[in-house]
Image (cartoon, rainbow, N blue to C red):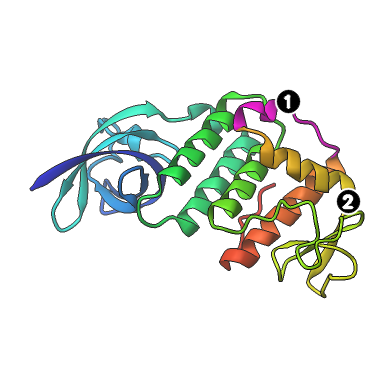
Amino acid sequence: MASIKTKAIVLGGTNVKEKDRLVDLFTLEKGRICVSMRGVRGDKAKLKMAKEPFCFGEFVLEEGKGHVVTQVEIVDNFYDLTKDLDKYYEGCAILDLVKSIAGQSEPKLFIELLQALKTLCYENVKKYYVFDKFLLDLTEFLGFSFCQNKCSCCEATLNMVYFDFGKGAYVCPGCKSETAIKLSQEAFKAIKILHDCGYEKLSSLTMTSGCEKEILKLLALNLEWRIGVKILKIN
């Protein structure tokens, strides 16, 4: 049987048999795949840490009727996420999003996920800012960019901004439909800043609590409209 090496992040898994686990991997080279990890639920199992969500490393897979993990060199398990419940849930929401849309090899999305987890784990970023950034970038990655400065229908200047979920874009009052909601100027400007900001600069961003809630709601609902998948609620 042939063996391959692939960089991968564990998205989750399901326990099977007495000590085995089927693991959902998002790999750099092959996209999302399901692999078998045998005996990893034993107390003395060498690979027991590699089965956990968030684990990032180089996985050696034996290919046959399926993929069996025979070796893992862990690069980072982002363990500190388990010490902060808010960050842990935020990280789980990001993993769930990737599970919802990942398919074949998608290096750009893999790098985006890795950047998000590193920032969430090691940087002092306010609650949900990493999730917001990931939602926004993921929407653009899927081809649904909306961060324009004019109405998407008539190209009027957006002095009063609405976001139309049916169109997936900003519109003016004259072009809004029944699927549109009004957006504050503060949120409109903050989304643009978030769009242009790299993960490494998220720790410097500050928004009012009302603006934070407005942005999170808009980004989550918009992606739900685009991909037809309910975004996991995070507390």
Q: Secondary structure at mark 2?
A: loop
- Which numbered disc covers residue 83? none
Q: Which residue is mark 2?
A: 184
In the rendering, at what x and y percent does residue 57 appear?
A: 34, 32
Nearer the observer, 235 or 119: 119
Disc 1 marks a residue whose amino acid type is: Ser
Determine the residue located farthest toward the bottom in the rendered image.
178
Q: Which residue is mark 1?
A: 204
In the rendering, at what x and y percent does residue 149 appear?
A: 79, 51
Q: Is residue 72 above or below residue 182?
A: above
Determine the residue located farthest toward the front in the rendered image.
155
Asked whether residue 205 is drawn in magenta, I would say yes
In the rendering, at what x and y percent does residue 136 appear?
A: 64, 48
Is residue 193 visible to us here?
A: yes
Q: Could you classify mark 2 by the number of other residues whose Cα lies within 10 Å: few (under 14), some (14-19), or many (20 or more)?
A: some
**Residue displayed at 26% across by 30% down:** 44
Q: Is residue 4 above or below residue 174?
A: above
Range of magenta residues: 199-208
In the rendering, at what x and y percent does residue 206 appear?
A: 80, 31
**Does 105 sit left or right of 221 as displayed?**
left
Is residue 229 visible to us here?
A: no
Q: Quadrant of residue 27?
A: top left
Q: Secondary structure at mark 1?
A: helix
